[in-house]
Structures are given as structure tokens and as C-alpha cells.
Image (cartoon, helix red, strand yellow):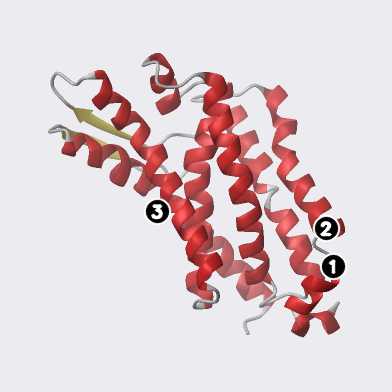
Amino acid sequence: MQSEKVFLTVFIITGFAMKILAEFVHEVLGHSLFVVLFGGEITNLYISVLWPYESSYVCWNLQNATSMQLAWIYASGIIVCMVLSFIIQAFLILKGRVWFHFEIALFWLAFWSLLSSSGYLLIGGLAPFGDVKELIELGVLTGMFSVFLGLAAFVISFVVLSAILKRVLVEVFSLEKARLGVSLFWLIIPFLAAVMVVSPERNLNLAYLPLAFVPALISFLMERFIFASKKEVNTYPDNVADE
């Protein structure tokens, strides 16, 4: 198996590439596809490599669009990304082991697609912007319902993605390091939240930033006191001697 340094390099590069792919899915397979299905045309497309500091976007033209069509267009990016994330998570959990690097790529795509959907609903519900703001103005969503939907999807995926990530990490690290790695991974959430706080395009209040540390804290507690059991040791027997 590859060294820890090589793994981390591949892991980070793959994560960045999948972030861009998730943005493409949101804008093209989501918004753009529904615009075309309703008979409209795409006039411009921009995929940002700096998301969430700046937004990706698609410009489109649809004559005499109904409220229902607009609702589907604005919601489509969120819906497509959420469905994609759930499908990938289910595949990785139910399928079991797949080619190692393919599993890493799918994990990252599921993660970024989750943030592009449930994360969008959560942040957009607290500080309306973008698609969520449009949906609220159309009367399809309320801020509270948006937060509820986003939180529900995130909680479910948090548990599943943590399990998938640990399975990936124990291929390279000891079980103890893998547990710590899962908790450290979720610190990406407060990092992204901090980026959104300083972004001129966002309206996220600094007061919300401490909440972004909750996933990492919960992960640490779960890995230390819930999942650190004999059952888990038996699940990864090859890694026990390294601890």
C-alpha cells in the first residue's frame, strides 16, 4: 500500500478535483438541464474553482416561465446533488470494497455534492442567498424548513460518510490514526464556513461560525467513546497491532 504522504497528496488533489465536478453537476446536470427541458437556452456558464468564496452560476433565458418551472429550475441543482450524494453513499456502503482510488473519488464527490445541497439549504436558510433565496421568494421554501431539510440530510450523511472515510483511512493508517483522521476531516466544515464569512458574495454572520465545529466535535466523541469498541477492532484486525 502507498505511503501516508503519497496517500494524503492523492487524497487532497482528488478532493479538489471532485469539488469542481460537484459544482459542474449542480450547474449543468441541475439548473442547465431543467432550463433546456423547459425549452429555454443557456447563455453563459461559470464554474468557480474558488467556491464557496465565490459562486458558480449559469445564465439562462426562458420566455414566459411559470412559477412552477422557476421553482424546478432553482431547486434542481440542490435536488440533483442531494440525490447523487445519497446514491454514492448507498453504493459505497452496500457494495463494500471497490478499487481504492475510485472509492476515494466517490467519497469526495458524495461529500461535495452533499455540501452543494444540504449545506446550501442550511446556510441559505440561515442567511438566504442564491437558489434558496429564490425559492423562499417563490414561496416554495421557508427559512426554517430549509434549515430542517438541510440538517436532516446532513445528519444522515454525516454518519455514513464517516464510516466510508474510516474504511478508506484504515487501508493506510492504523485504526487509531484513522479514527483521528475522520474527526480532523470534519474540520473542513468550519474552514468553509470561515471562507463564507469573509466572502463578499455571502451574508453569513460570524456568530454562526462556532456551530460549524459541531460535526468535528461530535465525530471526535463518537470515535473516542462509541465506535472505539471490541466490535470495531474485530472489523479491522490487521490494524490493531499498529496502534
Dividing the image into 4 quarters, which one contains the C terminus? bottom right
Check disc 3 and report the residue beneath it. Answer: 21
Q: Nearer the viewer, residue 14 or 98?
A: 98
**What residue type is disc 2 on?**
Ile
Position of 154 relative to 200 (above/below): below
Give the distance between the C-alpha atoms of the residues marked 2 and 1, in whole angstroms.
7 Å
Q: Name the residue type under label 1.
A: Ser
Q: Cβ–Cβ below 8 Å for labels 1 and 3?
A: no
The disc, 3 or 2, on the residue closer to the chain's N-terminal end is 3
**SS for callout 1:** loop
Q: Is residue 17 visible?
A: no
Q: Position of residue 127 (x, y in %)?
A: 56, 21
Few, some or many residues within 10 Å of mark 2 (<14, 14–19, 20+): few
Residue at which label 2 appears:
226
Answer with left or right where residue 134 lies relative to residue 194: left
Residue identifier under label 1: 229
Residue 23 position within the rendered picture, expressed as x and y whole percent measured from the top left: 40, 46
For the residues marked 3 and 2, what is the alpha-carbon distance in whole angstroms? Answer: 34 Å
Report whether 203 appears left or right of 228: left
Where is 120 relative to 141, above or below? below
